[in-house]
Amino acid sequence: MQESEQIGRPVPPRRGQVAKHASVLDAAAAVFCRDGFAGASIDLIAAEAGVSRQTIYNHHGDKEALFVAVVREMTERCNAGLFSTLTTFPDRPGDLEAEMAAFAGRLVRNCLYNRDGGALRKLIQSEGERYPALFAAWREHGPGTAWAAIAARFARLAHAGYLRIEDPDLAARQFLALIHADFHISHMLGTKPAEAEIDVGVANAVRTFLRAFGPTALGPPALPHHAHPN
Protein backbone atom coordinates (compact mmCIF):
# COMPACT_ATOMS: atom_id res chain seq x y z
CA MET A 1 0.00 0.00 0.00
CA GLN A 2 1.29 3.46 -0.85
CA GLU A 3 2.01 5.96 1.92
CA SER A 4 -0.73 8.35 0.78
CA GLU A 5 -3.28 5.54 1.00
CA GLN A 6 -2.07 4.66 4.50
CA ILE A 7 -2.56 8.22 5.64
CA GLY A 8 -5.92 8.62 3.97
CA ARG A 9 -7.34 5.27 5.14
CA PRO A 10 -5.76 4.28 8.48
CA VAL A 11 -6.21 0.77 9.86
CA PRO A 12 -7.63 0.94 13.41
CA PRO A 13 -5.77 -0.88 16.18
CA ARG A 14 -7.12 -4.17 17.48
CA ARG A 15 -9.64 -4.08 20.32
CA GLY A 16 -7.93 -3.71 23.68
CA GLN A 17 -4.80 -2.20 22.14
CA VAL A 18 -5.91 1.44 21.83
CA ALA A 19 -3.95 2.76 24.85
CA LYS A 20 -0.78 0.91 23.87
CA HIS A 21 -1.17 2.05 20.26
CA ALA A 22 -1.48 5.70 21.36
CA SER A 23 1.51 5.35 23.71
CA VAL A 24 3.70 4.01 20.92
CA LEU A 25 2.68 6.77 18.50
CA ASP A 26 3.22 9.52 21.08
CA ALA A 27 6.64 8.15 21.97
CA ALA A 28 7.57 7.76 18.31
CA ALA A 29 6.50 11.31 17.53
CA ALA A 30 8.66 12.65 20.37
CA VAL A 31 11.70 10.63 19.28
CA PHE A 32 11.33 11.39 15.56
CA CYS A 33 10.92 15.11 16.26
CA ARG A 34 13.91 15.16 18.61
CA ASP A 35 16.33 12.86 16.77
CA GLY A 36 15.05 12.81 13.19
CA PHE A 37 14.27 9.68 11.25
CA ALA A 38 17.89 8.57 10.89
CA GLY A 39 18.68 9.14 14.57
CA ALA A 40 15.60 7.38 15.89
CA SER A 41 15.58 3.66 16.63
CA ILE A 42 12.89 1.13 17.42
CA ASP A 43 14.68 0.29 20.68
CA LEU A 44 14.67 3.93 21.77
CA ILE A 45 11.01 4.38 20.86
CA ALA A 46 10.07 1.15 22.65
CA ALA A 47 11.88 2.27 25.79
CA GLU A 48 10.18 5.66 25.72
CA ALA A 49 6.76 4.04 25.19
CA GLY A 50 7.34 1.40 27.85
CA VAL A 51 6.73 -1.51 25.48
CA SER A 52 8.87 -4.19 23.90
CA ARG A 53 10.45 -3.68 20.48
CA GLN A 54 8.49 -6.72 19.30
CA THR A 55 5.25 -4.93 20.18
CA ILE A 56 6.20 -2.11 17.82
CA TYR A 57 7.11 -4.54 15.06
CA ASN A 58 3.81 -6.35 15.58
CA HIS A 59 1.82 -3.12 15.32
CA HIS A 60 3.75 -1.26 12.62
CA GLY A 61 6.22 -3.58 10.90
CA ASP A 62 9.30 -1.36 10.76
CA LYS A 63 10.59 2.14 11.48
CA GLU A 64 9.48 3.65 8.18
CA ALA A 65 5.94 2.31 8.60
CA LEU A 66 5.90 3.70 12.14
CA PHE A 67 7.00 7.09 10.82
CA VAL A 68 4.12 7.02 8.32
CA ALA A 69 1.71 6.12 11.13
CA VAL A 70 2.94 9.05 13.25
CA VAL A 71 2.39 11.53 10.41
CA ARG A 72 -1.04 10.02 9.70
CA GLU A 73 -2.11 10.31 13.34
CA MET A 74 -0.92 13.90 13.65
CA THR A 75 -2.61 14.84 10.39
CA GLU A 76 -5.90 13.38 11.58
CA ARG A 77 -5.74 15.28 14.86
CA CYS A 78 -4.83 18.51 13.08
CA ASN A 79 -7.78 18.02 10.73
CA ALA A 80 -10.08 17.44 13.70
CA GLY A 81 -8.95 20.77 15.17
CA LEU A 82 -9.41 22.47 11.81
CA PHE A 83 -12.98 21.28 11.36
CA SER A 84 -13.83 22.20 14.93
CA THR A 85 -12.53 25.72 14.26
CA LEU A 86 -14.41 25.90 10.96
CA THR A 87 -17.70 25.62 12.85
CA THR A 88 -16.97 29.18 14.05
CA PHE A 89 -16.56 30.58 10.52
CA PRO A 90 -18.61 33.79 10.10
CA ASP A 91 -21.27 32.68 7.61
CA ARG A 92 -23.45 35.78 8.12
CA PRO A 93 -21.02 38.41 9.41
CA GLY A 94 -22.27 41.67 10.80
CA ASP A 95 -18.73 43.09 10.70
CA LEU A 96 -16.92 41.16 7.98
CA GLU A 97 -13.39 42.35 8.72
CA ALA A 98 -13.59 41.96 12.50
CA GLU A 99 -15.24 38.54 12.37
CA MET A 100 -12.86 37.20 9.74
CA ALA A 101 -9.90 38.44 11.78
CA ALA A 102 -11.27 36.69 14.85
CA PHE A 103 -11.68 33.48 12.85
CA ALA A 104 -8.14 33.79 11.46
CA GLY A 105 -6.86 34.19 15.01
CA ARG A 106 -8.59 30.97 16.03
CA LEU A 107 -7.02 29.18 13.06
CA VAL A 108 -3.57 30.33 14.14
CA ARG A 109 -4.07 29.40 17.79
CA ASN A 110 -5.98 26.16 17.35
CA CYS A 111 -4.35 24.73 14.23
CA LEU A 112 -1.02 26.41 13.57
CA TYR A 113 0.50 26.57 17.05
CA ASN A 114 -1.04 23.59 18.79
CA ARG A 115 1.15 20.66 19.79
CA ASP A 116 0.37 18.44 16.81
CA GLY A 117 0.67 21.24 14.28
CA GLY A 118 4.12 22.20 15.52
CA ALA A 119 5.40 18.64 15.68
CA LEU A 120 4.00 17.77 12.26
CA ARG A 121 5.59 20.84 10.69
CA LYS A 122 8.95 19.91 12.18
CA LEU A 123 8.74 16.36 10.84
CA ILE A 124 7.74 17.47 7.36
CA GLN A 125 10.41 20.16 7.19
CA SER A 126 13.18 17.86 8.40
CA GLU A 127 12.21 14.67 6.55
CA GLY A 128 10.12 15.84 3.59
CA GLU A 129 13.04 16.04 1.18
CA ARG A 130 14.19 12.53 2.06
CA TYR A 131 10.66 11.09 1.80
CA PRO A 132 8.87 13.08 -0.90
CA ALA A 133 6.03 10.55 -1.15
CA LEU A 134 5.29 11.07 2.53
CA PHE A 135 5.33 14.83 2.04
CA ALA A 136 2.87 14.50 -0.85
CA ALA A 137 0.51 12.47 1.32
CA TRP A 138 0.60 15.07 4.09
CA ARG A 139 -0.01 17.81 1.54
CA GLU A 140 -3.07 16.00 0.20
CA HIS A 141 -4.67 15.15 3.52
CA GLY A 142 -3.45 18.17 5.52
CA PRO A 143 -3.23 21.57 3.79
CA GLY A 144 -5.31 20.29 0.88
CA THR A 145 -8.14 19.57 3.30
CA ALA A 146 -7.87 23.04 4.83
CA TRP A 147 -7.87 24.76 1.43
CA ALA A 148 -10.97 22.91 0.26
CA ALA A 149 -12.90 23.44 3.51
CA ILE A 150 -12.15 27.18 3.68
CA ALA A 151 -12.80 27.58 -0.05
CA ALA A 152 -16.30 26.20 0.46
CA ARG A 153 -16.97 28.82 3.16
CA PHE A 154 -15.65 31.60 0.96
CA ALA A 155 -17.85 30.42 -1.92
CA ARG A 156 -20.90 30.76 0.32
CA LEU A 157 -19.85 34.26 1.42
CA ALA A 158 -19.37 35.22 -2.22
CA HIS A 159 -22.79 33.84 -3.15
CA ALA A 160 -24.33 35.94 -0.37
CA GLY A 161 -22.54 39.06 -1.62
CA TYR A 162 -20.04 39.46 1.23
CA LEU A 163 -17.04 38.73 -1.02
CA ARG A 164 -16.23 38.92 -4.73
CA ILE A 165 -14.34 35.77 -5.60
CA GLU A 166 -13.90 34.10 -8.98
CA ASP A 167 -11.82 31.16 -7.73
CA PRO A 168 -12.59 30.14 -4.12
CA ASP A 169 -9.74 27.58 -4.03
CA LEU A 170 -7.20 30.25 -4.97
CA ALA A 171 -8.72 32.68 -2.47
CA ALA A 172 -8.47 30.06 0.30
CA ARG A 173 -4.79 29.40 -0.42
CA GLN A 174 -4.04 33.11 -0.48
CA PHE A 175 -5.98 33.68 2.75
CA LEU A 176 -3.97 30.98 4.53
CA ALA A 177 -0.72 32.32 3.09
CA LEU A 178 -1.54 35.81 4.36
CA ILE A 179 -2.36 34.71 7.91
CA HIS A 180 0.85 32.65 7.99
CA ALA A 181 3.04 35.45 6.60
CA ASP A 182 3.88 37.27 9.83
CA PHE A 183 4.68 34.03 11.62
CA HIS A 184 7.12 32.48 9.16
CA ILE A 185 10.17 33.14 11.31
CA SER A 186 8.38 31.73 14.36
CA HIS A 187 7.67 28.58 12.31
CA MET A 188 11.34 28.17 11.46
CA LEU A 189 12.50 28.73 15.04
CA GLY A 190 9.77 26.63 16.63
CA THR A 191 8.62 29.52 18.83
CA LYS A 192 5.14 30.87 19.46
CA PRO A 193 4.34 34.55 18.96
CA ALA A 194 2.75 36.57 21.71
CA GLU A 195 -1.03 36.90 21.75
CA ALA A 196 -0.81 40.55 20.74
CA GLU A 197 1.42 39.63 17.79
CA ILE A 198 -1.14 37.09 16.61
CA ASP A 199 -3.92 39.68 16.82
CA VAL A 200 -1.92 42.22 14.81
CA GLY A 201 -0.77 39.65 12.26
CA VAL A 202 -4.21 38.27 11.49
CA ALA A 203 -5.75 41.77 11.38
CA ASN A 204 -3.19 42.81 8.77
CA ALA A 205 -3.77 39.61 6.81
CA VAL A 206 -7.54 39.99 6.71
CA ARG A 207 -7.33 43.66 5.79
CA THR A 208 -5.07 42.78 2.85
CA PHE A 209 -7.33 39.89 1.83
CA LEU A 210 -10.43 42.10 1.80
CA ARG A 211 -8.68 44.68 -0.37
CA ALA A 212 -8.46 41.95 -2.99
CA PHE A 213 -11.68 40.05 -2.35
CA GLY A 214 -13.96 42.38 -0.39
CA PRO A 215 -17.43 43.25 -1.67
CA THR A 216 -16.18 46.28 -3.64
CA ALA A 217 -12.73 44.93 -4.52
CA LEU A 218 -13.54 43.92 -8.10
CA GLY A 219 -16.18 46.50 -8.82
CA PRO A 220 -15.77 49.81 -10.64
CA PRO A 221 -14.53 52.79 -8.66
CA ALA A 222 -17.26 54.70 -6.90
CA LEU A 223 -18.40 57.83 -8.73
CA PRO A 224 -18.31 61.18 -6.97
CA HIS A 225 -21.75 62.17 -5.72
CA HIS A 226 -22.19 64.90 -8.35
CA ALA A 227 -21.28 62.48 -11.16
CA HIS A 228 -24.08 59.99 -10.49
CA PRO A 229 -26.73 60.02 -13.24
CA ASN A 230 -30.12 61.45 -12.35
Image: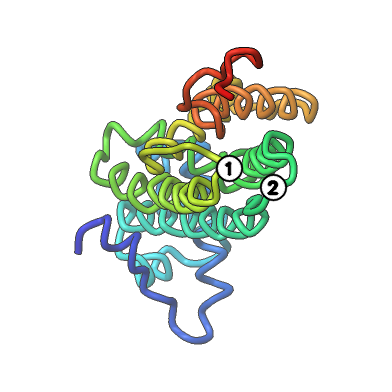
The local secondary structure at tag 1 comes to loop
| Count of numbered labels shown in the rendering | 2
Q: Can residue 180 be seen in this view?
A: no
Q: What amino acid is found at the position of numbered circle 2 in the picture?
A: Pro
Quadrant including the C terminus: top right
Farthest residue toward the left? 1
Q: What amino acid is found at the position of numbered circle 1 in the picture?
A: Tyr
Q: How far apart are marks 2 and 1 (CA)?
A: 8 Å
Residue 156's spot in the image, x, y percent?
Answer: 50, 53
Residue 133 or 29: which is nearer the viewer? 133
Residue 128's spot in the image, x, y percent?
Answer: 33, 36
Residue receiving disc 1: 162
Residue 8's spot in the image, x, y percent?
Answer: 34, 62
Q: Which mark is residue 90?
A: none
Residue 204 or 159: which is nearer the viewer? 159
Question: Is 15 on the left-hand or right-hand side of 225?
Answer: left
Q: Which residue is drawn at 42% across and 43% down?
A: 40
Residue 142's spot in the image, x, y percent?
Answer: 42, 49
Quadrant including the N terminus: bottom left
Residue receiving disc 2: 93
Query: In the rendered view, would you say 139 is above or below 51?
Result: above
**Of callouts 2 and 1, the N-terminal one:** 2
Q: Can residue 111 be seen in this view?
A: yes
Asked whether the residues under the numbered discs 2 and 1 touch, taking CB atoms below 8 Å apart as contact, a structural biologist would say yes
Give residue 12's quadrant in the image: bottom left
The local secondary structure at tag 2 comes to loop
Farthest residue toward the front? 230
Within 10 angstroms of label 1, few (less than 14), some, or many (20 or more) residues?
A: many
Q: Which residue is drawn at 30% across and 50% down?
A: 137
Query: In the rendered view, would you say 76 is above or below 143?
Result: below
Q: Which residue is drawn at 39% across and 59% down?
A: 69
Question: Is 185 on the left-hand or right-hand side of 134?
Answer: right
